[in-house]
Each structure stands twice: as C-alpha cells, then as structure tokens.
Amino acid sequence: MKVNIKRFLFKYSLVPPWHWRTGATFLVALIVGLGFFLLDISNATSYLSDDPQACVNCHIMGPQYITWTHSSHREVAHCNDCHVPHDNVFNKYFFKAKDGLYHASYLQPGPNRR
C-alpha cells in the first residue's frame, strides 16, 4: 500500500526522474532566463508606467507624441490621464494591455499598407 501511494505521487509529480533532473533544471533555468531577457530588451516594464514616452515605444504614436510635447497640455496631463480608465487598477492594466496589443497588431505599417 505504501509503495502504491509513492508511485502515484511520483507519477503525477512535476519532479523528473533523477537522471533527468540536471537537464530539466538547465532547461527551466534557460526558459526563465530568456523570459527575463525578453522582458528587459522589449522595455515591457515601461508599459506599466504613466510615462508618455512609453506610448512611443512601438513607433505608432509618434505624431501624437510630438504634438503633445509641443503643446501646453503637457504641463497639465499625460496620455493615461485621458485615455485610460481609472475606476480600478485591474481595469486600467487590462485596458493598457488590450490597447497595446491592438496597436501592435493592427496598426503596424506593412509593405502593402499606405
């Protein structure tokens, strides 16, 4: 009975057999490291801020950003003050993620778009 429980627990455990542990540990460390590298190189943390410079990271909002920087509006308000909901923090970041994905996927200038 004790052996059956141990087999059951090991069979459905995420711990690999002992002869695979070194390779599995290396693979998990590699995936986590590449994930952190991609977050760093893509400036992903800048999208969590309210800095207007983050709007220009994807190179789509360039004309709007330049217009904003030359106006007196820049002293009073930032992009997120008017364009992002403020009812709760989850809705704010959900909207930012949804809007960012929309801008990144639908508004990218392609070779056939004008």
Image: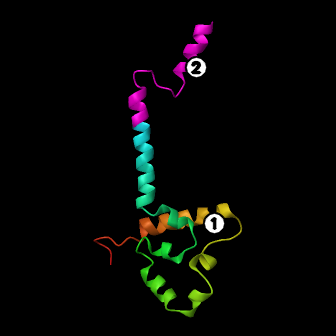
Say left or right for 104 vs 83: left
Image mark for residue 92: 1
Looking at the image, tell me whether mark 1 or mark 2 is earlier in sequence order: 2
Pointer 2: residues within 10 angstroms few (<14), some, or many (20+)?
Answer: few
Q: Which residue type does callout 2 highlight?
A: Leu
Q: Which residue type does callout 1 highlight?
A: Lys
Front residue of this view, candidates 1 and 103: 1
Question: Is residue 36 depicted above or below 100 in this figure?
Answer: above
Helix, strand or loop at mark 1 = helix
Verify whether residue 88 appears in magenta: no
Question: Is residue 42 depicted above or below 81 in this figure?
Answer: above
Front residue of this view, candidates 109 and 40: 40
Q: Which residues are magenta?
A: 1-26
Residue at (45%, 45%) from the top-left corner?
32
Helix, strand or loop at mark 2 = helix
On the image, which quarter does residue 43 sit in? bottom left
User: Residue 30 location in percent, x, y?
Assistant: 40, 42
Quadrant where the C terminus sits is: bottom left
User: Residue 92 location in percent, x, y?
Assistant: 63, 66
**Residue where numbered disc 2 is placed:** 9
